[in-house]
Image (spheres, rainbow, N blue to C red):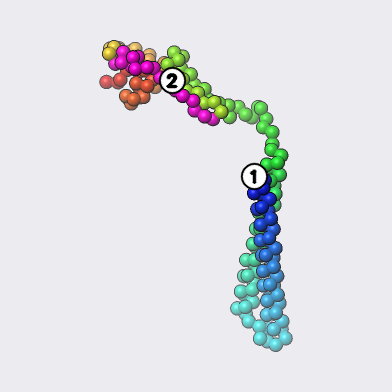
Amino acid sequence: MSFLYICAIIVLIVFALFFGFKYKQVEGADYKNKRLRDRHGAGSFTTSVSNFLAKIFWGGLVVISILLGIFCFAKMSEIDNPKKIDSQDSGASQPLAIQNQDSKSTISNSKNTLSTISVPGDNSSSTLQNKIYTEQEIRDLEEKVQYSGDDPVIRMRLGLPPKN
């Protein structure tokens, strides 16, 4: 990665030199126009304005190239010397782990990757559909798995009876 930053710095240096050269060319043309005006009265106002705008343009590109070169150099040194992460601040980046008490479904996120979700087999979902539950039993099951929605697929995966 630092190789790319080195290449970018070299390209930006070349650009800054080229833009600086173009700036000096415009400055010379502006000097020539002023000299013609002062000595011979033949200088042009429009040439003077266009030279002024060109100096702003090329000078701005020189400044931008130099600033981008400094930015690339700073990024390159940041990559070479990474900052150490404080263990107290890393609490927000801890892996997420949600586990159901009856261990019918477990969702865990370790190192920012989602692991598999274990769901009950076909036999448990078929017995849930065959058994008649009271509303209190359904509420207790929903509280256990922390889901009270109407989606039949999710309810089946969580081991909940369908809502009627």
Q: Nearer the viewer, residue 3 or 39?
A: 3
Estimate the spatial distance between the alpha carbons at disc 1 and disc 2, rounded to whole Å.
Answer: 40 Å
In the image, residue 5 sits, relative to residue 141, either above or below, namely below
> As displayed, is residue 98 above or below residue 45?
above
Question: In the picture, residue 131 is in which quadrant?
Answer: top left
Task: Read off the residue under disc 2.
Answer: 118
Amino acid, disc 1: Met
Task: Tell me where residue 11 sits by quadrant.
Answer: bottom right
Q: Is 34 left or right of 100, judged from the image as shown?
A: right
Q: Which residues are magenta?
A: 112-129
Query: For the point 68% across and 76% down, which residue is it?
Result: 29
Residue depicted at 52% across the width and 26% down the height: 109
Disc 1 and disc 2 in contact, CB within 8 angstroms: no
Q: Along the line of sight, which residue is nearer the eye, 21 or 45? A: 21
* Type of amino acid at the residue the image marks with label 2: Ser
The residue indicated by pointer 1 is 1
Is label 2 in a helix, a strand or a loop? loop
Q: Is residue 52 visible?
A: yes
